C-alpha cells in the first residue's frame, strides 16, 4: 500500500513521494533493496503500472518489463518447499512489490481499490466485514465528500416562507 499511496494529492496538487532519489533509495533500503538508478527506475515503473491497474488504465507494458524473465524457483527445505525469486538484482524489489500486490489481490479480492474521492490519488485496503469502505480516510476524504453532498442538498431544498 505504501508504494501505491506514494503519489498523494496535497493542496490540490499531485505529489510524488518517490520523486527524490534520496527518498526512494531510503525506502528501497528499508525494504531490502540496494538503491541506485536502475532500482529506482524499476520501482517507479512498477508503482506506476500498479496504480494504472487499480484505476482501470492499461498497465501491461510496465508490468511486462518488470516481470520479464522473472521466475520463482522451488527449493526443498526442512519445512517443505521454499520459493526463491530469480530476478535481476536491480529489478528484485520492484518484482517483490508486484508479487505483494498480487498476493493481496488474491487473498482479499475486491478489497484493494482507489479512494472514492475523485480528487484523491490514494488507495484503500477495505478490511470492513461488509466490504463497504469508500474512502482512504474518513477524517479527510469521507468527511469532505459528505459535507459537500450535505451542502448541495441544503442548496437544493427550498426554504419555507
Image (spheres, rainbow, N blue to C red):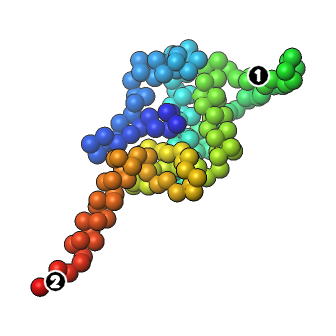
Residue 63 at x, y = what percent?
62, 38
Q: Secondary structure at mark 1?
A: strand
Crowd around label 1: few <14 · some 14–19 · many ≥20 (10 Å) = few
Residue 49 locus on image (x, y percent): 55, 40
Quadrant housing residue 8: top left
Q: Secondary structure at mark 2?
A: loop
Q: Which residue is mark 1?
A: 84
Which tag, 1 or 2, sits closer to the chain's start?
1
Q: Quadrant of the C terminus?
A: bottom left
**Of the two numbered discs 1 and 2 in the rendering, the one whose residue sits closer to the viewer:** 2
Work out whether residue 119 can be spotted.
no
Disc 1/disc 2 C-alpha distance (Å):
71 Å
Residue shown at 41% from the left, 18% from the top: 22
Residue 115, image x, y percentages: 45, 50
In the displayed orientation, state which residue is furthest to the bottom.
161
Task: Please say if 10 is above or below 84.
Answer: below
Q: Is the C-beta separation of discs 1 and 2 under 8 Å?
A: no
Residue at 44%, 46% in the rendered image:
136
The extreme left residue here reads: 161
Q: Position of residue 98 (x, y in %)?
A: 62, 35
Q: 31 left or right of 20?
A: right
- Residue 131, by quadrant, is bottom right
Query: Of 75 and 92, which appears nearest the observer?
Result: 75
Give the labeled residue for mark 2. Answer: 160
Residue 64, compared with residue 22, is above or below; it is below
Res. 117 image quadrant: bottom left
Task: Say which residue appears at 60% left-offset and 31% top-offset.
Answer: 97
Amino acid at each position: 500500500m505504501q508504494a501505491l499511496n506514494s503519489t498523494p494529492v496535497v493542496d490540490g496538487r499531485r505529489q510524488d513521494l518517490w520523486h527524490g532519489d534520496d527518498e526512494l533509495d531510503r525506502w528501497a533500503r528499508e525494504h531490502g533493496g540496494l538503491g541506485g538508478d536502475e532500482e529506482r527506475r524499476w520501482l517507479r515503473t512498477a508503482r506506476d503500472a500498479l496504480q494504472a491497474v487499480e484505476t482501470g488504465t492499461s498497465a501491461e507494458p510496465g508490468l511486462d518489463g518488470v516481470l520479464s524473465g522473472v521466475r520463482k524457483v522451488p527449493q526443498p527445505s526442512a519445512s517443505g518447499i521454499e520459493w526463491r525469486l530469480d530476478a535481476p538484482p536491480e529489478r528484485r524489489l520492484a518484482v517483490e512489490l508486484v508479487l505483494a500486490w498480487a498476493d493481496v489481490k488474491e487473498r482479499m479480492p475486491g478489497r484493494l481499490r482507489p479512494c472514492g474521492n475523485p480528487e484523491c490519488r490514494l488507495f484503500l485496503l477495505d478490511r470492513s466485514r461488509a466490504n463497504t469502505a469508500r474512502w482512504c480516510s474518513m477524517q479527510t476524504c469521507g468527511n469532505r465528500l459528505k459535507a459537500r453532498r450535505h451542502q448541495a442538498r441544503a442548496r437544493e431544498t427550498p426554504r419555507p416562507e
